[in-house]
Amino acid sequence: MVSEQKPLSSPFGYRSTAMEVADGIDLSGMNIIVTGGYSGIGTETVRALVSGGAQVIVGARRPDVAREVLAEMGENITILPLDLSDPDSINGFADLVGGQMDGVDILINNAAIMACPLARDARGYESQFATNHLGHFQLTARLWPLLAAAGGARVVVLSSIGHRLNGLDLDDPNFETREYDKWLAYGQAKSANALFALQLDKFGEPHGVRAFAVHPGGIATPLQRHLTMEEQRAMGWYDEEGNVHEAFKSVEEGAATSVWCAVSPLLEGMGGVYCENCDIAAPAGDDVPMGGVHPHVRDEALAQALWDKSEEMTGVIFRP
């Protein structure tokens, strides 16, 4: 059963770091996959998990860069090529993982693109929806036997406060009949991420697999590569002197909720919830203007409809 969307008494919060969350938790013997685990909060997510003794596989679109970034973290990291916009690359990654391990204890679907100009993958699918959602949908489907085999696996899906923009249109997910808006496209993809976690948890619970959606917070990372400084100043992210807004998190803080969902004993036996600031999020409202979960990503009928559409678009039948 999907857990109640209600905050817990978490000992961690807004300014907690990933290392603080992982401190004292023994992850030795665990196999963990982190997509995009070599940039921004992905790097700090990997650092915290490796510190607990886990074996971590990083899916990387740029393996050479990943090797350079992660070299100082030790030998418990394996880097494998993964392009989430390319179905063949996803299948190839899953095959390589299956050849190296018998089970996956934690899958963190971290990689993303944001607010980019209109682009389409080889299938003609809009790039943000294709990369952020469909790619992870296919990847999770391909890794499903390993997740189910692990016993008590968790899947952490990175969403965003950007889900409040919604934009989800299952009749036109690729902006073929409506005008492209980079923020609506991002909102659609991030809404899809949260809805995927909701439905995956419902399907996964009988197999011991639980899923969580995460809003990491506002963080200055390469995710903003498609935005000009002028745009970011207009949104209040930076001031005229180039200083980042005081409400932004560091990358260490931004990785904390992903790690919390992956390893916290407080979430044992729970799943299907949207989390932020190292806790289950409260409903969005006037008292939480820059956070909270909006009702459409808690809609179980919409989550099922998205799942059906995702199977249709990817050609991957994923029925755990």
Image (cartoon, grey):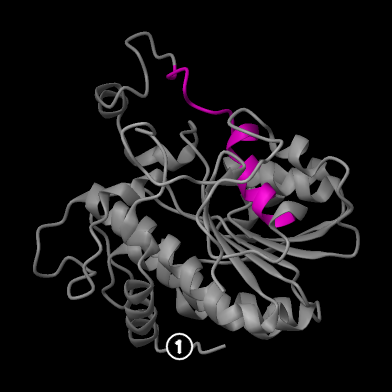
Q: Nearer the viewer, residue 223 or 297?
A: 297
Q: Is residue 90 visible?
A: no
Question: Taking 199 as reference, is 142 above or below it?
Answer: below
Left or right position of 192 against 165: right
Indicate the quadrant where residue 57 lies: bottom right
The percent position of residue 290, horizontal first and vertical second, equals 38, 34
Furthest toward the top, the residue is 241
Magenta-drawn segment: 244-263
Q: Is residue 66 magenta?
A: no
Left or right position of 10 against 119: right
Q: Residue at x 23, y 56 (%)?
A: 118
The percent position of residue 209, horizontal first and vertical second, equals 66, 75
| Secondary structure of residue under mark 1 | loop
Q: Which residue is mark 1?
A: 316
**On the rendered image, what quadrant is the C terminus found in?**
bottom right
Amino acid type, callout 1: Val
Number of numbered discs: 1
Q: Residue at x 63, y 57 (%)?
A: 63
The percent position of residue 187, horizontal first and vertical second, equals 30, 53
**On the rendered image, what quadrant is the N terminus found in?**
bottom right
- The crowd level at tag 1 (other Cα within 10 Å; few <14, some 14-19, many 20+) is some
Magenta part, dominant SS: helix
Left or right position of 176 against 196: left
Q: Residue at x 47, y 23 (%)?
A: 247
Q: Nearer the viewer, residue 92 or 56?
A: 56
The percent position of residue 218, horizontal first and vertical second, equals 46, 34
